[in-house]
Amino acid sequence: MARVYVSSVISAPAARVWARVRDFNGLPNWHPAIAESRIENGEPADKVGCIRAFSLRNGDRLREQLLGLSDYDMFCTYAILDSPMPLTNYVATLRLTPITDQERTFIEWSADFDCAPEREGELVGGIGTNVFQGGFDALKRAFGG
């Protein structure tokens, strides 16, 4: 099983960062690689089990299912259902932790998935850099960091 883990610090209170990222349908509002997103069947975006269908700016389309969401613990966990990437059993968690010193946020994003051994390095690197770190960099810019 492959594992991706990326973490960062954002110069804003965790509650403000969480307000930006908690919307399971809100990726286009903060992640630069996402063109559009919708929740299937008109379900609420914070209902565990809902499915988001979204497209990347490069035209790729994905479907993901919300597996867990906690405003108290500030995390969301989701699984990829359909993706052009050659992987299976992808489950990821985005988690925020308050840093009380200077009211900053420790943010971490991790994923586990299965793939062909010869593709693992490419997939781990691409997801870690383009998806996870790309999202963190956009959040840092949005919050002035």
Image (cartoon, rainbow, N blue to C red):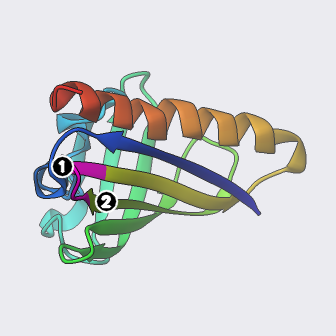
Reply above or below: 27 against 122. below
Local crowd size for mark 1, using a 10 Å CA cut-off: few (<14), some (14–19), many (≥20): many
Real-space CA distance between mark 1 and mark 2, rounded to the nearest whole angstrom? 8 Å
Q: Mark 2 falls on what kind of element? A: strand
Observer-nearest of 17 and 78: 17
Front in this rendered view, residue 131 or 108: 108
Which mark identifies residue 96? 2
Q: Is residue 11 left or right of residue 116?
A: left
Residue 99 position in % (x across, y down): 27, 56
If the image is split into quadrants, where does the C terminus sit? top left
Regarding mark 1 in the picture, which secondary structure is present there? Answer: helix
The three-letter code of the residue at mark 2 reads Leu
The image position of residue 107, as x and y in percent, is 36, 51
Magenta stretch?
99-105
Instruction: Tell whether position 100 is magenta.
Output: yes
Could you tell whether 89 is left or right of 65 in the image? right
90 or 30: which is nearer to us? 30
Q: Identify which residue is drawn at 20% across, 75% down.
A: 47
Q: Residue at x 88, y 49 (%)?
A: 117
Quadrant of the rendering where the N terminus is positioned: bottom right
In the rendered view, does 41 fall on the left or right side of 84? left
- Callouts 1 and 2 close, C-beta under 8 Å: yes
Q: Hey, what amino acid is under mark 1?
A: Val
The residue at 18%/46% (across/down) is 102
Q: Residue lying furthest front in this view?
A: 101
Image height of 30 relative to 16, above or below? above
Q: At 46% across and 41% down in the image, what residue appears?
A: 132
Residue 67's disc is none
Asked if the magenta segment contains residue 54, the reply would be no
Q: Is residue 54 above or below residue 1?
A: above
Q: In this view of the protein, which residue sits in the foreground, 36 or 5? A: 5
Q: Position of residue 72 (x, y in %)?
A: 19, 77
